[in-house]
Amino acid sequence: MSSPAITVIVPGRDVAGFAGEALQSLRAQSLDAWRAVLVDDGSIDDTRRLFADAAAADPRFVVVEHREPRGLGAARNSGLDRVETPYTAFLDADDRLRPHALERLWSTIEASGSAFVVGAYVRLRPDADGPGYTAGSVQPWVAAATDPARTGTTLAEHPAASGNIVAWSKLSRTDFWHTHGLRFPEGRYYEDQVVAQRMYTLATAFDVVPDVVVDWRERRDGGSITQRRSEIGVLRDYLDALGEGIAVLRAAGADAAVSERGRLIRTLDLPPLLRIAETHPDPAYRIALEAFIETLPA
């Protein structure tokens, strides 16, 4: 291709230990018709320098700097402001793309004409006896959302797709974002969940593929948001995002997806939170969790 088809938005804050691997996973893509907007969200480590060095060496990389941290939602929105390609994708700067990820997603959506395409992902967990990380297998709820491949499907036909709520497993038509005014909530955690459910309910059609497109890192230092759910503030944002996602599905009349999300939250999200609540020193944690459970669909 003579011009880029895809803009990959890569937000990061203080991820110097992982950003090089994320950027290399972009350089290694079998489809080279991409550009990347690297959004440094007020880092105080070498993340900004790594992003700047990448842009200096490869014109496909463009850097956006937040002088002060504004959060992941704001960083993604800054990237969205700079998309000029037909398609938009996301990659967090501590994760990595599989080599054929963009090609697989792009070829699928080009052929189908759908609003977006969703791929599978796996956890990248720290090795017990070394400094490295090893990718696991596709988890059952991820497989339920993406396997087998479907083109031109809808949430009514495939309600299990609503279990894939992460921004970075999808490739979307940029016009879809503009037409529906899609933006990420700012100033909160788990900002991608509500956006994902809005995407599923707004799309005339979307595609799913079973291919693993992203390795999602579970950091050894416990620094990722999903590893901080014992914090009251993180818990409240988490529960708000889950509840708002269900509300979006319910408002759209997606009853099967509402039931599917309720089942998945009860079997996947709640058990670790309940274990934390058993020994949490602040009773507000248990109170917030119990109040949320009362709102879940049966």
Image (cartoon, grey):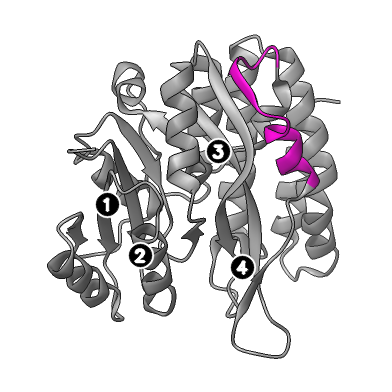
- Span highlighted in magenta in the image: 140-157
Q: Which residue is mark 3?
A: 193
Instruction: Determine which quarter of the picture holds residue 178.
Output: top left
Q: Is residue 150 magenta?
A: yes
Q: Which residue is mark 4?
A: 218
Residues under labels 4 and 3: Cα distance?
19 Å
Q: Are marks 1 and 3 in contact (CB under 8 Å)?
A: no
Residue 83 horizontal side relative to residue 200, left or right: left
Marks 2 and 3, how far apart in space?
25 Å
- The answer to whether mark 2 and mark 1 are in CB contact below 8 A is yes
Residue 129 occupies which quadrant of the picture?
bottom right
Q: CA distance from mark 4 to mark 1?
A: 23 Å
To which residue does mark 2 refer? 23
Give me the residue at 76% from left, 41% from top.
141
Is 286 placed above or below 24 here?
A: above
Which residue lies at the image location 28% right of the left edge and 43% below the top edge?
Answer: 33
- Which amino acid, by three-letter code, is at mark 4? Glu
